[in-house]
Amino acid sequence: MIQLLAGFWDRLGMGVSGLCAIHCMMTPVLVSLLPVWPSLEMYHDYSHFAFFLVIAPVVYFSLKKRHDNKQVFLLMIVGLAIIFSAWLFRNALGEYGESLVTLAGSTLLIRGHWLNYKNKCSIKYETA
C-alpha cells in the first residue's frame, strides 16, 4: 500500500498537467471546428482557473514533507504561478497567448513532478 502511494501525487500531477497542456494545444483546433463556440466561450474563460484549482492541491500534496530538493520546489512553484498568471492576465495575453503561457507552466509542472517522482522512487529503493 505504501509503495502504491509513494508517487501518487506526482503521477496525478503529471497527468493533470498533461491534460492541461493537451487542452491548451487542442483548444485552437476545436475553436475552428465548432460553430457553436461563442455560446461556450464563457466556460473557456474559466477553464485555466479550474485547472489551477485542481493543480494547486496536487502540487501542495506532492511537495508536502518533501521540499528539500530546491530544483523540484522551484519548478513546481514557478509552473503553478505561471498557470495562475496566464489566467489572471488572460485579457492582455489574448487567447493564444494565454494558451502558450499556460503550456509553459504545465511543462514546468510536469518536469518538476517527474523529478520529484524519480527522487522519491530512488530513495524508496535505496532504503529497501
Image (cartoon, rainbow, N blue to C red):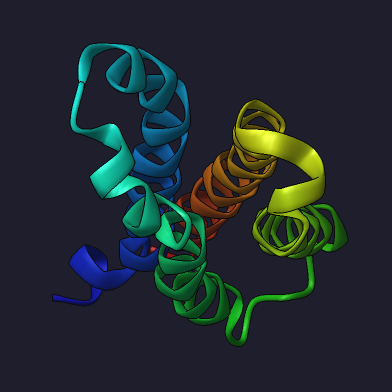
Question: With 5 as the anchor, is 19 left or right in this view?
Answer: right
Q: 70 or 57, which is in the foreground?
A: 57
Q: Residue at x 45, y 46 (%)?
A: 17
Q: Is residue 81 found left or right of 7 in the rendered image?
A: right
View extreme (left): residue: 1
Q: Is residue 67 above or below residue 71?
A: below
Q: Residue at x 63, y 26 (%)?
A: 96
Residue at 55 percent of width and 70 percent of height: 59
Q: Report x, y in % for residue 22.
A: 38, 29
Tell me the quarter of the picture where residue 84 sits: bottom right
Q: Position of residue 61 (x, y in %)?
A: 48, 81
Q: Nearer the viewer, residue 115 or 20?
A: 20
Q: Which of the pair 2/60 is nearer the observer?
A: 60
Residue 6, given in percent of the width and then of the height, sits at 34, 67
> How many marks overall?
0
Quarter of the rendering occupied by the C terminus:
bottom left
Please, is residue 8 above or below residue 34 in the view? below
Kindly identify the residue that appears in the image at 58 percent across and 84 percent down.
64
Q: Quadrant of the N terminus?
A: bottom left
Where 64 sits versus 43, above or below? Answer: below
Residue 105: x %, y % from top left: 68, 44
